[in-house]
Amino acid sequence: MNSARNKQKKCKICSNLIVGRNDKIFCSLRCKNYYHINLRKVTNIAALNIDRILHRNRSILLEIMGKNTIQKKVNRIILEQKKFRFNFLTHFHINSKGKTYHWVYDFAWMSFSDDEIYILRKRK
């Protein structure tokens, strides 16, 4: 007999033996539902925390830019003092010159040097 076939798998949640198909990972619907409900909870909490940071970054950029300014150069220290989180962004774009724009919703920033940041607002 095949030894791999005789090996019993245990449920990912309760560690009970699984009966049925060999690709099952839960012993019952109850365990399966428990796993997926908790997975969604953890995912939602993480997404909310990241979204708060993104909204805060956008607010900081809006505060610096004002309502009507489309582009502006600022000192990096200004953003750092306002607790801007440079590693949180919604997407990025590399232009034809190889420069990377880091986007937070409708605002972008690009590092000119270690000291200067160019901020840009997406035109409507």
Image (cartoon, helix red, strand yellow):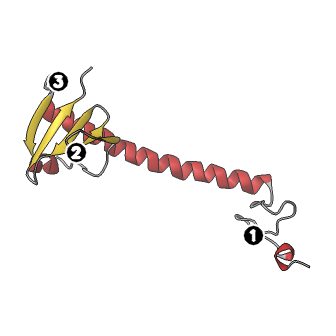
The location of residue 117, given as percent across then percent down, is 13, 44
Going by the numbered disc 2, the residue's amino acid type is Gly
The location of residue 112, given as percent across then percent down, is 11, 47
Picture quadrant of residue 93? top left
- Which mark, by number, is residue 98? 2
Q: Nearer the viewer, residue 60 or 113?
A: 113
Please state which of the two labelled residues, at mark 1 or mark 2, is closer to the viewer.
2
Contact (Cβ within 8 Å) of mark 3 with mark 1: no
The location of residue 10, given as percent across then percent down, is 77, 69
The location of residue 85, given as percent across then percent down, is 25, 50
Gap between marks 1 and 2 measured at Cα = 53 Å
Residue labelled with disc 1? 15
Residue labelled with disc 3? 67
- Closer to the N terminus: mark 3 or mark 1? 1
In the rendered structure, the answer to whether residue 104 lies left or right of residue 119 reads: right
Q: Nearer the viewer, residue 29 or 6?
A: 6
